[in-house]
């Protein structure tokens, strides 16, 4: 293949790091997506989002905050102080609306949107606990709300399992643990947690505490000052703040644990550890002409992180390639937040970075 490429009289244009060849697109010897011409990637869509936090030079700026429950409800903290997920529709006076309206003066590189909406904040007292355990390395027994959960009779093993947002039984049906506790105030969160865990007893009182961070695209000095000012106006106290860089976020898999439901399959687990439903495995075999087990045995299945390494591409390129696979009908949904995509790839012995980039880029372009 290398000799064929070298002898072809074509001109290769490079734009934004993307190599493409008009000749290859019309060649009579196209690259075939057979057993040695493709791989299967799990949750490839996650990589672009992940890379925003793990790319060299990026960081988040975090705030540990607290306030009295009687002065501000959790719902108002999220809705009025933080603002809606879409910053364009966030309440006037909220952080996200201010960042959206003044992004240029705050030295952001681009206008905020639903994904890059400036700032993240915990959705409940329990989610805040889970985020402190993850991002700050806090210990359950030392955390104020962690102590309150334990004192309310909820077993440690249950609490730790809940930090991964499992589906739990409540009121006769299963639901996301995080969603069940969303926007509840301190005591209401403890009471509902007791109910879900099937325990009862007295509950200690305490302050509301949340984990907040400026997302990488919004980490600027003016934005930091804006957050401090908005919290002071709302009666929210910052008791600790600081920065976490990309290297730490990558090494300790902080963003992967933050987005656990998706990242578990995209980066934290290897494909062999996953077990798609039997019916979906049959669908996989019919769609791709190979069984899930055989694809695993052949070493053709990769999680998203390893898939990028195998192909020699970054998260942005994977995102484009994943989009092309979707358009071509080469994605299969195994379940909620669990997808497999068939992606073109040269043989391992031929997979130098530049060659792989050409193969993957052409596929992404053709899929448009």
Image (spheres, grey):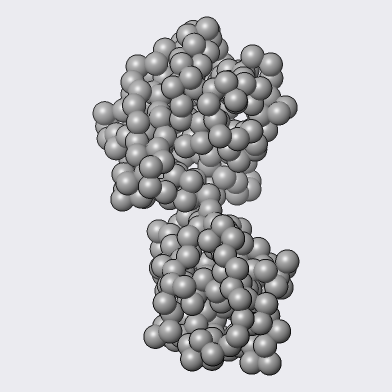
Q: Which residue is rendered at x = 45% and y = 57% of the image?
A: 264
Of 79 and 280, nearer the camera is 79
Quadrant containing the C terminus in the rendered view: bottom right
Asked if 173 appears above or below 298 in the picture, the reply is above
Q: Is residue 194 visible?
A: no
Q: Left or right: 244 with respect to 89?
A: left
> Is 143 on the left-hand or right-hand side of 9?
left
Q: State the residue in front, 151 or 108.
A: 108
Res. 50 in view? yes
Question: Which one is nearer the viewer's eye here, 168 or 279?
Answer: 279
| Residue at image location 53% in from the left, 53% down from the top | 48
Residue 137 location, quadrant:
top left
The answer to which quarter of the image holds residue 330 is bottom right
Looking at the image, how many numbered discs can be counted on the residues? 0
Instruction: Write down the quadrant of residue 66 in the picture.
Output: top left
Q: Relative to residue 102, is residue 59 drawn left or right? A: left
Residue at the spot 44% in from the left edge and 44% down from the top edge: 53
Nearest to the observer: residue 355 or residue 40: 355
- The location of residue 233, given as percent across then percent down, is 52, 7
Image spot of residue 125 (x, y percent): 47, 27
Q: Residue at x 68, y 24 (%)?
A: 90
**What x and y, as percent, mark residue 129?**
40, 32
96 sits to left or right of 351: right
- Horizontal and vertical percent for residue 121? 51, 29
């Amino acid at each position: 293949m290398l000799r064929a490429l070298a002898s072809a009289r074509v001109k290769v244009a490079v734009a934004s790091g993307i190599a493409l060849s008009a000749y290859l697109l019309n060649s009579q010897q196209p690259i075939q997506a057979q057993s040695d011409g493709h791989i299967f990637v799990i949750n490839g869509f996650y990589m672009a989002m992940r890379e925003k936090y793990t790319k060299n030079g990026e960081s988040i700026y975090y705030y540990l905050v607290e306030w009295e429950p009687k002065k501000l409800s959790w719902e108002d903290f999220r809705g009025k102080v933080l603002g809606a997920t879409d910053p364009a529709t966030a309440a006037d006076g909220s952080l996200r609306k201010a960042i959206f309206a003044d992004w240029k003066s705050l030295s952001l590189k681009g206008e905020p949107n639903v994904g890059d909406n400036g700032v993240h904040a915990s959705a409940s007292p329990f989610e805040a606990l889970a985020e402190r355990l993850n991002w700050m390395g806090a210990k359950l027994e030392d955390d104020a709300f962690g102590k309150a959960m334990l004192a309310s009779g909820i077993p440690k093993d249950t609490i730790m399992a809940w930090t991964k947002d499992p589906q739990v039984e409540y009121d006769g049906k299963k639901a996301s643990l995080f969603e069940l506790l969303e926007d509840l105030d301190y005591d209401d969160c403890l009471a509902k947690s007791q109910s879900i865990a099937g325990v009862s007893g007295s509950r200690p009182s305490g302050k509301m505490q949340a984990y907040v961070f400026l997302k990488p695209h919004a980490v600027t000095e003016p934005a930091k000052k804006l957050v401090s000012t908005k919290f002071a106006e709302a009666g929210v106290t910052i008791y600790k703040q600081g920065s976490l860089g990309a290297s730490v976020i990558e090494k300790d898999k902080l963003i992967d644990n933050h987005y656990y439901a998706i990242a578990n399959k995209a980066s934290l687990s290897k494909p062999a550890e996953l077990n798609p439903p039997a019916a979906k495995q049959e669908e996989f075999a019919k769609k791709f002409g190979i069984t899930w087990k055989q694809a695993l045995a052949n070493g053709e299945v990769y999680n998203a992180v390893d898939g990028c390494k195998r192909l020699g591409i970054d998260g942005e390129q994977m995102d484009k390639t994943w989009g092309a696979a979707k358009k071509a009908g080469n994605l299969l949904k195994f379940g909620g937040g669990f997808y497999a995509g068939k992606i073109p790839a040269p043989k391992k012995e031929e997979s130098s970075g530049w060659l792989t980039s050409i193969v993957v880029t052409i596929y992404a372009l053709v899929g448009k």
